[in-house]
Amino acid sequence: MNLTSEEKEMLSGKQGKAVKKSMEILVALGEIYGAKRMVEAKSVQIAGVSYHNLGDAGLEFLEEMGQDGKVKVLTTLNPAGMDLEEWQKLGIDSGFAEKQMKVIDAFSRMGVTITCTCTPYLIGNLPRFGEHIAWSESSAVCFANSVIGAITNREGGPSSIASALTGKTPEYGMHLEKNRQAQVRVLVKAKIDSVPKFGAMGRVIGEKIGNKIPLIEGIQSASLEELKSLSAAIATYGGTAMFHMKGITPAKTAVPKKSISIGEKDIAEALGKFDCAEEIDFVGIGCPHASINEMQKIAELLKGKKVKKEVWVCTARQTKQLADKMGYSKAIEDAGAKIACDTCMAVAPIKGRFKGMITDSAKACYYAAGHNGIKTRIRTVEECVEEAMK
Ligand code: F3S
């Protein structure tokens, strides 16, 4: 790779051990993937924050990097394994909480902004169209590339930390315009008009074309919440880092020759595949983390009512603070539901606690089944709230 004198200096160790190690990681990645140079990463999102996923080896790596490493660009964090302030209310044990706080302390020492959300674009880490960034969190990566038009590979935890400490990322993959073109045209001939249906469409497309970039046609309108759900589902079930949607997303693409169609039957089948829970004892909303719009809607649905099941509404702490001011948090909590900040139903250590989860999120279904052995049912948020009161 052609490195600038500044990058060579980082690699030599003159800027400290953490920067040296970071540059080694980035150069190794660049050489594996044929990058010719580094580009400036304007912001970073780090995934791999839950102690549940990191373990002691991950914590050790972070503590080592935190000894002399300081972030050079705006850097935010994915959800942790617990609500950092009210972990007891979610039934987290104190041993886990202690380790999780050590992880957070290590990130704090590096100067990372302790956001703990998978929707950084809703709370201040909002890149511009065409800006190079280094994000790790598949749903946020897909949202950033597709809906915002920023440019990022699907980074891993260590490579995103390396970018944070150097402000650089190797120029390969999604950073090159030729790799951002649609590869398959997807003609949607079904009515896609709810968050679960956008998630189901993401699953169908992901399962049909894998990690190829689709040009989705036939969608008349899509809300922010529907697009974040689609980004999460399509990345989870297929592995793509980007989609184009005719008339909705901002990047230009040539129309690919290869095309497939998706009809009502495909969507119904996908919705059916999520539905395997006979008994529901957990309601999980907010995957990806709920927007303020969703908080308002949930508050309206719950106002003056009482839930009979464990209900988690997962959101960013900053969104909750706004919801507090608007009275939404009070309506939700007075009904007996819990607002889970900083974490989510996939990264919190909840294995064995619940049998069946109802959710409006296709991605949450994937992780509930895979990580936590919980059976699932997918419904609209209105239906989830109704189920919570049974
Ligand atoms: Fe976010 Fe957790 Fe879903 S990290 S995308 S709420 S699985």
Image (cartoon, rainbow, N blue to C red):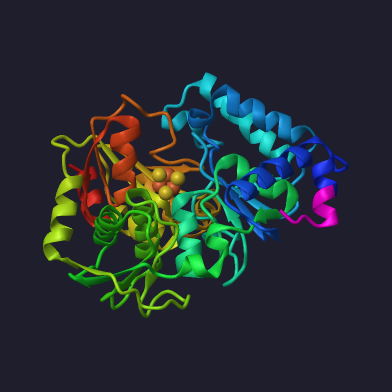
Q: Is residue 3 magenta?
A: yes
User: Is residue 155 or residue 123 the one in the foreground?
Assistant: 155
Q: Is 340 displayed left or right of 37 in the figure?
A: left
Q: Going by the picture, which residue comes out furthest to the right?
A: 14
Q: Is residue 114 magenta?
A: no
Residue 330 at least partly seen: no
Q: On the rendered image, what quadrant is the C terminus found in?
A: top left
93 shown above or below 119: above
Measuring 47% from the left and 40% from the top, which residue is drawn there? 343
Give the percent coordinates (x, y) of residue 386.
Answer: 20, 50
Q: Going by the picture, which residue comes out furthest to the bottom?
A: 247
Measuring 53% from the left and 19% from the top, which residue is drawn there? 95
200 shown above or below 354: below
User: Is residue 116 or residue 323 the one in the foreground?
Assistant: 116
Measuring 60% from the left and 65% from the top, which residue is drawn there? 127
Q: Is 249 displayed left or right of 131 in the figure?
A: left
Give the percent coordinates (x, y) of residue 128.
Answer: 60, 70
Give the percent coordinates (x, y) of residue 20.
Answer: 78, 40
302 shown above or below 255: above
Residue 298 picture quarter = bottom left
Q: How many marks?
A: 0
Q: Is 40 displayed left or right of 133 in the figure?
A: right
User: Is residue 202 or residue 343 the one in the foreground?
Assistant: 202
Write down the region rendered in magenta: 1-8
Residue 157 picture quarter = top right
Give the percent coordinates (x, y) of residue 376.
Answer: 22, 40
Measuring 44% from the left and 70% from the top, which residue is drawn there? 181
Residue 288 at least partly seen: yes
